[in-house]
Amino acid sequence: MEPLTALAQSLGLAFASGISAYAAAAFVGLAGHLGWIGPLPGALGVLTDPWVFGTAGALALVEALAMLVPGIATAWEAVHTAIRPFAAAALAVLATWGEPRLAVVAALLGGALGLATHATKLGLRATIDTSPEPVTNAAATTGELGVVAALAWAIWAHPWIALAAALVLLTALLYVVRALWRTVARAIAALFSPPTAPGS
């Protein structure tokens, strides 16, 4: 495999890990085990072990349930600030295993991309938690898992297209989160601002 293609695949996987490291490992492992994708590059074949993708899948299920509860969702995301970037870097290294220089580059870029993706998701979840109804949380969780599942296939079938789509999505989400935060900030400011006297 060409080094640049392997790097694109590792970064696509890192982006998916920034959304959910557990779901990314579970989807890639299950798809590889069933022969839907592959052969997996580097040392990623370890994910096809039923114990590995089964454990990742169980953790992904727990995560999905936690995401349905406002407050708990934000707390879960905050805790995973210490997990997802490192998981993204680790999976990027596994994807480029056997190419030491490429693996170092993949680890650095993958960790940075995983952190950026996670931080964006954290901001989005914090904004969603301001809505008390569960529908928004369920829709967001379903959308996130859909993106991860799609990437789990696309990064092997069309690595460059998948990576480009991931970066475009990340950029769009950054703008969305920024707009949502501004809206929430204005609403909070209006709520606590003193009432204007009549005629003033």
Image (cartoon, grey):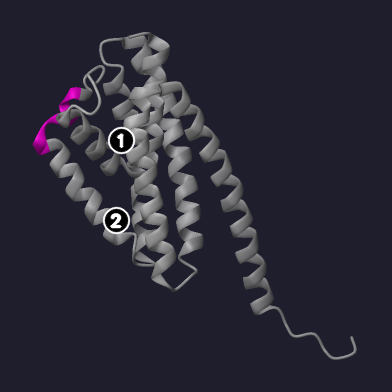
Looking at the image, which residue is at 22% across and 33% down?
31
Q: Position of residue 37 (x, y in %)?
A: 25, 26
Looking at the image, which residue is at 42% across and 24% down?
108
Q: Is 68 located above or below residue 35 in the figure? A: below
The answer to whether residue 40 shows anywhere in this view is yes
State left or right for residue 132 relative to residue 172.
left
Q: Which mark is residue 87?
A: 1
Q: Which mark is residue 64?
A: 2
Neighbor class of circle 2 (other Cα within 10 Å; few <14, some 14-19, many 20+) is many
Amino acid of disc 2: Ala
Amino acid of disc 1: Ala
State left or right for residue 72 relative to residue 190.
left
In front of the other: label 1 or label 2?
Answer: 2
Distance between the Cα atoms at labels 1 and 2? 18 Å
**Viewer-side residue, 170 vs 72:** 170
Q: Is 167 located above or below residue 144 in the figure? A: above
- Name which quarter of the figure residue 74 lies in: bottom left
Q: Is 73 located above or below residue 79 in the figure? A: below
Marked residue nearer the N-terminal end (1 or 2):
2
Span shown in magenta = 45-51
Neighbor class of circle 1 (other Cα within 10 Å; few <14, some 14-19, many 20+) is many
Looking at the image, which residue is at 56% across and 52% down?
177
Q: Is residue 50 magenta?
A: yes
Q: Secondary structure at mark 2?
A: helix
**Viewer-side residue, 44 vs 98:** 44
Q: Position of residue 165 (x, y in %)?
A: 50, 32
